[in-house]
Image: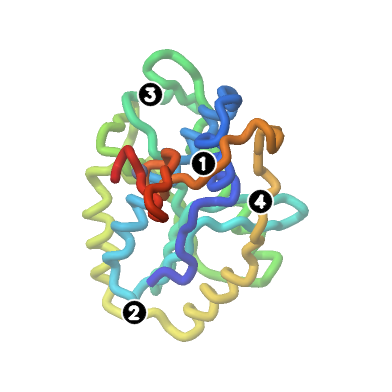
Amino acid sequence: MFLKPRFPSHELLCLRSLTSRTSILAKSRQHYRNLEKGLEGETYYDEWLKTLPEEKTIILCDLLFETNHTHFQIDTLLLTPDTLYLFEVKNYEGDDYRDGDEWYKMAGDEIKNPLLQLKKSESMLRQLFQEHRLHFPMKPYLVFPHPNFFLYYATPDLPIIFASQIKRYLSKWQSRNRPLSKTQRQLAERLKTLVIESSPYTLLPSYTFEQLQKGIFCPTCSSLLQLQDKTLMCQKCS
Ligand SMILES: [Zn+2]
C-alpha cells in the first residue's frame, strides 16, 4: 500500500504553468523537461510497486528528509517484513557506460555517477535512523525503468534493477510469507512524520506578470482554451 503517494512537485507544477504562459524560458526548459521525464519514470515504477500485496508492503514516495543540517531526497522506500528497500529511480534512455567511478553517455559526456548518488542517499538515511534511534535492515537499489536503456560494463554485483528485471524482483518481494508486523507499520508511520514538505532545491526562473499569457489552459495538453457559448473547449485535443 502507498502510505505516501507521489504528486508532481511544486517546482514542476510552476514550471508546467510557466512553460504554457511564457516563451522566455529557454534556460529552464531543459530543467523542466528533465523533471517531467523523471516523474514519468518514477510513476511508471510506482505502477509496478502498486501490484505488491498490501499486507506485506508499505511504499513511501518522494521523500525529503533532514539530518545533521543536510537535506536529502529519496525517490521511493519500500518496507517489507525483513528489509527496507531504498530506490533511486533514473529514467535514462539510450546507451551509457561505466569506467571505474565514472559514468558516461555513449556520446561522450560524463554525467554524475548515479551509483555514488545512491550511496550518499543510503548513508544519509542511515544517519537519520541513528539520529532517531530507528533500526531496520536496509538495501539500496538504482532502478532504470526505461526499456530503451542499456549500461555497458554492468556487473552482477551492482545494486541495479533494469527494466527487464523489475517483474522478477517484484515476484521475489511478493513471495514473502508473512505480513508486516505492528512495529514495522509504526516504523513506516514514523518515517512519514519525519518528511519535510518544502524543498530547498527549487529553481524557478524570474518572470513578471506582464510577460505571462493570461487565460485558462487545457489540463490534458496544456494549450490555451477558447470560450464557446459559455463552454471552455480545447481546440487541440477537444
Ligand atoms: Zn487539450
Left or right of 75 in this view: 44: left
N-term-proximal mark, 1 vs 2:
1
N-term-proximal mark, 1 vs 3:
1
| Marks 3/4: CA–CA distance | 31 Å
N-term-proximal mark, 4 vs 2:
2
Mark 1 touching mark 4, by CB under 8 A? no
Number of the label disc, if any, that sits on residue 199: 4
How dense is the environment of label 2, judged by Cα within 10 Å: few (below 14), some, or many (20 and up)? some
How dense is the environment of label 1, judged by Cα within 10 Å: few (below 14), some, or many (20 and up)? some
User: Which dot, 2 or 3, sits closer to the camera?
Assistant: 2
Q: Mark 1 points at which residue?
A: 16
User: Which dot, 1 or 4, sits closer to the camera?
Assistant: 1
Residue 179 picture quarter:
bottom left
Left or right of 214 in this view: 167: left
Q: Name the residue under label 2.
A: 55
Q: What residue type is labelled 2?
A: Glu
| Marks 1/4: CA–CA distance | 17 Å
Q: Name the residue under label 3.
A: 97
| Marks 1/2: CA–CA distance | 37 Å
Return the residue found at the far bottom.
Answer: 182
Mark 1 touching mark 3, by CB under 8 A? no
N-term-proximal mark, 2 vs 3:
2
Task: Establish whether ligand 1 lies closer than 8 Å to the Cβ of label 2.
Answer: no
Q: Which amino acid does label 1 sit on?
A: Arg
Q: Quadrant of the C terminus?
A: top left
- Residue 128's x, y, as percent? 65, 61
Residue 122 seen in this snapshot: no
